[in-house]
């Protein structure tokens, strides 16, 4: 029979494990959230919003930029620009007070959409990893902002970045950091050691685009999907072996929305400038993986923000209109005008939509219509950054302000959860 002390220690370990697991599920540790598909679970948040509405937890000014918000361990992380410089910063998730701010270098130069960074920082094992505007890959301690390592990736690998600046967010899997680099001679996409930043492998040839790499398991094989200026590369994570590829050339190489993995064998790609979308199916045959086109359509043209998938329907922004498309054949189900170039995520089976002018919607997924449950103006001005959801709160930003929202009368405390482990 186990001793009381032994039983107590076992219960403590089980409790800690449960807390860690729930904390990881409640975080938004990287671009596109915990599952890399713009979805998360937070039943309490959705129910509280529907029953009581939303109220601000806090608001604070930020510098210009469109960087997304990573949220974990009671802290929010993002990038902005001010006075010609680019900054990585962290604020307290509970009250919005600044924890630390780190200058990365000159701010990215931009020709079209306004100034400021687009990259969303990525969290893993207490490290925050980000590609700076000048092409340095940087890892900092998430709690203090201390630089752990800095690698001049663009200079070392002759990276060719798109005209509006680097926008891809790092994908951390295990002890590797994956990024498109755009270098010549087999250096289009690469993996780097998480502990040192040194290159682990590089492969293929193409210019970098804006899309972020995605982890996938397709046809039973683990792989990293890189969408570059004219190609989709599916690469084996350990050694960088090319598993399959697909030609996807777009206007001026503007592939901005990341690949969306659906089930265990499908990949959805979409781009603006009248490019449209394609649904691919990946199958295993003769020891190799083979992609094939299931359908192609111009009714979903994601300019930069991703679509989400729910119950056989794709929801996303077809240029400046919110649209629903049948994932089986690419036919349009409905289209909602007047929201501009907004963004959408999926929270516990509900659509959370942010319009370009800062109006936030909660909607029920529907094949028939945009079924709005609640709407409220939460920001003003151009709001291109998608919402992030963590621990019962919604985190939003535009080019000058950041806001945290919670259900009316909700808890004022934010639990310190655990950043996603390696």
Image (tube, rainbow, N blue to C red):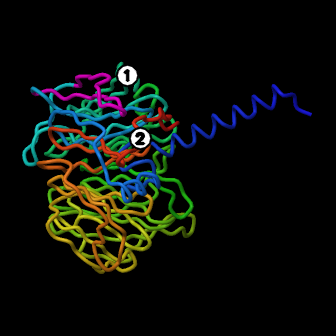
Q: CA distance from mark 1 to mark 2?
A: 20 Å
- Packing grade of label 2 (10 A; few <14, some 14-19, many >=20) is many
Q: Earlier in the sequence, mark 1 or mark 2?
A: 2
Quick one: 137 or 24, which is closer to the camera?
24
Q: Residue shown at 26%/22% (left/top)?
A: 102
Q: Is residue 325 left or right of residue 399?
A: right
Q: Residue shown at 22%/28% (left/top)?
A: 87
Quick one: 137 or 82, which is closer to the camera?
82
Q: State which quadrant residue 367 falls in.
A: bottom left
Q: Which residues are magenta?
A: 84-104
Whole-percent x and y of residue 403? 25, 41
Please say whether residue 89 is one of the residues in the magenta stretch: yes
Q: Residue shown at 47%/50% (left/top)?
A: 241
Reading the image, the residue beneath label 1 is 149
Q: Residue shown at 36%/80% (left/top)?
A: 329
Q: Is residue 60 left or right of residue 410?
A: left
- On the question of residue 27 being in view, the answer is yes
Q: Tags 1 and 2 in contact by the CB under 8 Å rule? A: no
- Quarter of the figure that contains the N terminus: top right
User: Which numbered mark, 1 or 2, is in the foreground of this view?
Assistant: 2
Whole-percent x and y of residue 134? 20, 31
Reading the image, the residue beneath label 2 is 29
């Amino acid at each position: 029979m186990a001793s009381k002390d032994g039983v107590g220690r076992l219960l403590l370990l089980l409790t800690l494990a449960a807390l860690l697991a729930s904390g990881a599920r409640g975080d938004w540790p990287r671009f596109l959230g915990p599952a890399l598909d713009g979805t998360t679970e937070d039943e309490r948040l959705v129910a509280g919003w529907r029953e009581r509405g939303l109220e601000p937890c806090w608001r604070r000014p930020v510098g210009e930029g469109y960087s997304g918000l990573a949220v974990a361990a009671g802290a929010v992380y993002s990038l902005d620009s001010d006075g010609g410089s680019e900054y990585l910063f962290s604020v307290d998730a509970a009250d919005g007070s600044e924890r630390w701010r780190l200058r990365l270098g000159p701010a990215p130069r931009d020709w079209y959409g306004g100034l400021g960074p687009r990259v969303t920082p990525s969290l893993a094992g207490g490290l925050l990893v980000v590609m700076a505007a000048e092409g340095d890959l940087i890892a900092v301690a998430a709690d203090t902002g201390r630089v752990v390592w800095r690698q001049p990736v663009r200079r070392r690998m002759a990276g060719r970045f798109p005209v509006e600046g680097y926008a891809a967010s790092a994908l951390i899997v295990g002890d590797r950091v994956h990024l498109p680099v755009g270098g010549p001679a087999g250096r289009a996409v690469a993996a780097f050691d998480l502990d040192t930043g040194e290159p682990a492998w590089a492969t293929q040839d193409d210019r970098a685009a804006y899309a972020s790499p995605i982890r996938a398991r397709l046809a039973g094989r683990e792989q990293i999907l890189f969408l570059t200026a004219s190609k989709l590369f599916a690469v084996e994570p350990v050694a960088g072996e090319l598993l399959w590829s697909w030609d996807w050339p777009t206007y001026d190489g503007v592939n901005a929305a990341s690949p969306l993995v659906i089930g265990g064998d499908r990949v959805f790609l979409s781009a603006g400038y009248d490019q449209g979308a394609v649904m691919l199916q990946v199958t295993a045959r003769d020891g190799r993986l083979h992609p094939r086109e299931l359908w192609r359509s111009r009714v979903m043209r994601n300019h930069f923000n991703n679509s989400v998938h729910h119950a056989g329907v794709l929801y996303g922004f077809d240029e400046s209109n919110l649209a629903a498309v049948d994932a089986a054949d690419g036919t349009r189900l409905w289209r909602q005008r007047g929201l501009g170039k907004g963004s959408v995520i999926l929270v516990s089976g509900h659509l959370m939509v942010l319009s370009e002018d800062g109006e936030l919607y909660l909607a029920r997924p529907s094949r028939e219509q945009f079924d709005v449950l609640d709407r409220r103006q939460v920001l003003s001005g151009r709001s291109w950054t998608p919402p992030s959801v963590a621990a019962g709160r919604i985190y939003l930003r535009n080019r000058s302000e950041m806001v945290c929202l919670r259900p009316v009368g909700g808890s004022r405390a934010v639990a310190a959860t655990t950043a996603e482990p390696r």
